[in-house]
C-alpha cells in the first residue's frame, strides 16, 4: 500500500489534481464506468486476478493507460500489446516520460490531426 | 484363408473398444510363444524385466501396427489393464486422443528405423485418465540382423510435470513479491526524504519502517505466506515498542487470532507500526503514564461482515491537532483504506489519539 502512496506523491509533483485508486478488479471497473479519468495506471496483477477486464474497460472509454508490473516478462497482454509498460520499481522520470506522451497525444487529438 | 481374414477384421474393430481380449492370429501366437519360451528360461534379464518398476513391453516388428507380445507387471500397473487386454493390441492403442503430431512421428520413426528413438507423449489408462510418459523404443535384432521385435520402456512423467509447474509458479510469485518489496522500500525512502532533511532522522525513519516490513515478512514466512493471525500480527508489530522498553503493562490487547490474508497482514502491520511510532514520539508512550488499548471485533453490517479494530491511547500528554497530515496519517487513512477496501479514521482527541479501522472481515471469520 505504500506503493500507492509513492504514486500519489509522484503524480502530485507532476501537477495531477486528483488520484483515485482501486485495489480490486471490481472496484476498478466501477470507477472506470462511473467517473471520467484523463489517464490510468493498471497493475497487471490485481490481487492475483488478471486485469484484462479493466484494460478492456479503459480502452472502451478511451482512457489512455500504462501497465505496471512486477513480473519479468511472462505477462500476456492480448489485445493491449501497444500500451506502454512500467516495470516495478520505476523511477519518477520514467513515469514523467509515459504521462507526457499521453498528454501530447491528447493535444494532437484536439488539434485534429 | 477366410478364417484369418475374419480374425484380422475383428482385431481392427477392437482398437476402439478396450475391454475385450484380442483374437489372435497365428503369427501373434508364434511371436508370443517365442517370448514365453525365453521367459521360462529365467535368468537375470528375465527377472529384471518382470520385477522392475519401469513399465516395459515387447512388440512384434514383423506385424503391421507393432502388436504387443509381452508386457511386464509394471506396465499393467501403470496403465490399469489386464495382460490379456494388452497382448495383441497395437502399440499405439494407449495414445490419448489429441496426441501431438511431432511425438507421434518420432515414435513411428523409432518403429520404422533401426535405431533407438523415443518421445514424450500423452497416454490414456484403462480408466480413461491421462498421463504424460517418456518412452524409449529400441530395436531387437534376430540372428540375421533384421529387426525382429521392439523393446519399449515407459517413465511416468506426471509428478515431474506437476513439480515443474509448481516450481515455475513459485518463482514467478517470488519475483512478484520481491518487486513489490523493492517498490515499498522506494516509497519508504522517498517519504523519509520528503519529510525531513536531518540525516539522523532520515536514517531512523527508513530503518524503523524497513524493520517493520521485515517483521511482517517473518510473520508471513512462518506460515508459508498463507496469511497470519491478527493477534500474532499485533504482538509482532508492537514487540519493539513494548516489552523490550518496559512498557508491557501499558499495552492491553483484546481480540481473537482472526486469520488475515497476506495482503491484509502487510497493510495492518504497517498501520500498527505507524500508530506505535506516533505514540512513542508524541502520544501515550512519550511519557511514563500513558497506555494503549487495542481491541477488535467482527460485526455484521449492511455491507456484510466487518472487522473493526480500535486503537485508543490515554493518559499521554495532551494531544494537539497536527498542522498537516504526516506520513503515518496518510498511510492509515489513505493507504490502508485503498489497499484493504475499507476505511480508517485517525482522531486526535485531546485526551488521547483514537484510530478506528473498518475493513471487510476475512472470509469465514467470526468473533471468537
Image (cartoon, grey):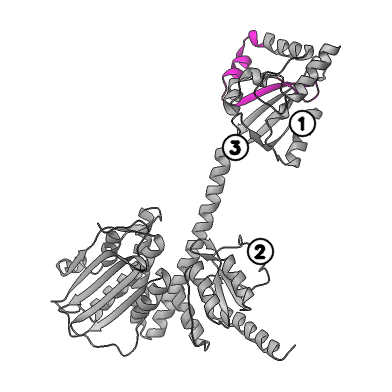
Which residue sits furthest left? B289
- Spatial CA span between label 2 and label 1: 39 Å
Q: Give residue B110's mark.
A: 1
Give the x, y percent position of residue A14: 53, 87
What residue range appears in magenta?
Answer: B39-68
Marks 2 & 1, CB-CB < 8 Å contact: no
- Residue B62, magenta (yes or no): yes
Q: Nearer the viewer, mark 2 or mark 1?
A: 2
- Do marks 1 and 3 share a chain? yes
At 29% across and 88% down in the image, what residue appears?
B322
Q: Is residue B20 left or right of residue B351?
A: right
Q: Is residue B281 left or right of residue B163?
A: left
> Mark 1: few, some, or many residues within 10 Å (few <14, many ≥20)?
many
The residue at which mark 3 appears reads as B157
B80, B38: nearer the viewer:
B80
Give the x, y percent position of residue A107: 67, 89
Q: Examine the image and state in which quarter residue B355 appears.
A: bottom left
- Spatial CA span between label 2 and label 3: 31 Å
Chain of the residue on which disc 1 is drawn? B
The residue at which mark 2 appears reads as A78
A59, B264: nearer the viewer:
A59
Amino acid at each position: 500500500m505504500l506503493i500507492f502512496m509513492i504514486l500519489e506523491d509522484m503524480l502530485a509533483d507532476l501537477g495531477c489534481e486528483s488520484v483515485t485508486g482501486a485495489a480490486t478488479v471490481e472496484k476498478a471497473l466501477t470507477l472506470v464506468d462511473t467517473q471520467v479519468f484523463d489517464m490510468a495506471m493498471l497493475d497487471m496483477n490485481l490481487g492475483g486476478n488478471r486485469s484484462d477486464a479493466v484494460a478492456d474497460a479503459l480502452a472502451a472509454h478511451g482512457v489512455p493507460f500504462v501497465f505496471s508490473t512486477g513480473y519479468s516478462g511472462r505477462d500476456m497482454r492480448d489485445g493491449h500489446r501497444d500500451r506502454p509498460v512500467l516495470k516495478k520499481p520505476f523511477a519518477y522520470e520514467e513515469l514523467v516520460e509515459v504521462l507526457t506522451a499521453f498528454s501530447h497525444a491528447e493535444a494532437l487529438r484536439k488539434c485534429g490531426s | 484363408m477366410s478364417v484369418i481374414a475374419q480374425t484380422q477384421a475383428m482385431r481392427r474393430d477392437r482398437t476402439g473398444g478396450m475391454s475385450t481380449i484380442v483374437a489372435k492370429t497365428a503369427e501373434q501366437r508364434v511371436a508370443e510363444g517365442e517370448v514365453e519360451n525365453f521367459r521360462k528360461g529365467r535368468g537375470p534379464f528375465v527377472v529384471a524385466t518382470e520385477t522392475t518398476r519401469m513399465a516395459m513391453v515387447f512388440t512384434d516388428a514383423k506385424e503391421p501396427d507393432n502388436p504387443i507380445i509381452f508386457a511386464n507387471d509394471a506396465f499393467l500397473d501403470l496403465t490399469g489393464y489386464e495382460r490379456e487386454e494388452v497382448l495383441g493390441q497395437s502399440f499405439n492403442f494407449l495414445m490419448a486422443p489429441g496426441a501431438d503430431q511431432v511425438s507421434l512421428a518420432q515414435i513411428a520413426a523409432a518403429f520404422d528405423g533401426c535405431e533407438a528413438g523415443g518421445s514424450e507423449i500423452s497416454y490414456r489408462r484403462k480408466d480413461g485418465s491421462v498421463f504424460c510418459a517418456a518412452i524409449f523404443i529400441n530395436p531387437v535384432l534376430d540372428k540375421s540382423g533384421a529387426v525382429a521385435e521392439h523393446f519399449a520402456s515407459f517413465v511416468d512423467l506426471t509428478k515431474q510435470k506437476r513439480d515443474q509447474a509448481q516450481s515455475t509458479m513459485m518463482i514467478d510469485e517470488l519475483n512478484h513479491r520481491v518487486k513489490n518489496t523493492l517498490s515499498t522500500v522506494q516509497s519508504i525512502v522517498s517519504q523519509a526524504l520528503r519529510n525531513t532533511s536531518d540525516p539522523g532522522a532520515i536514517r531512523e525513519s527508513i530503518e524503523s519502517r524497513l524493520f517493520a516490513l521485515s517483521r511482517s515478512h517473518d510473520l508471513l514466512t512462518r506460515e508459508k505466506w498463507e496469511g497470519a493471525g491478527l493477534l500474532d500480527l499485533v504482538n509482532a508489530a508492537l514487540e519493539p515498542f513494548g516489552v523490550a522498553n518496559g512498557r508491557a503493562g501499558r499495552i492491553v490487547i483484546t481480540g481473537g487470532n482472526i486469520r488475515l490474508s497476506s495482503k491484509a497482514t502487510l497493510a495492518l502491520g504497517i498501520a500498527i507500526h505507524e500508530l506505535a511510532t506516533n505514540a512513542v514520539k508524541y502520544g501515550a508512550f512519550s511519557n511514563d503514564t500513558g497506555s494503549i488499548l487495542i481491541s477488535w471485533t467482527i460485526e455484521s453490517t449492511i455491507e456484510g461482515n466487518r472487522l473493526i479494530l480500535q486503537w485508543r491511547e490515554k493518559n499521554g500528554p495532551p494531544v494537539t491537532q497536527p498542522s498537516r497530515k504526516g506520513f503515518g496519517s496518510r498511510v492509515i487513512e489513505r493507504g490502508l483504506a485503498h489497499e484493504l477496501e475499507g476505511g480508517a479514521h485517525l482522531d486526535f482527541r485531546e485526551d488521547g489519539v483514537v484510530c478506528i479501522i473498518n475493513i471487510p472481515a476475512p472470509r469465514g471469520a467470526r468473533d471468537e
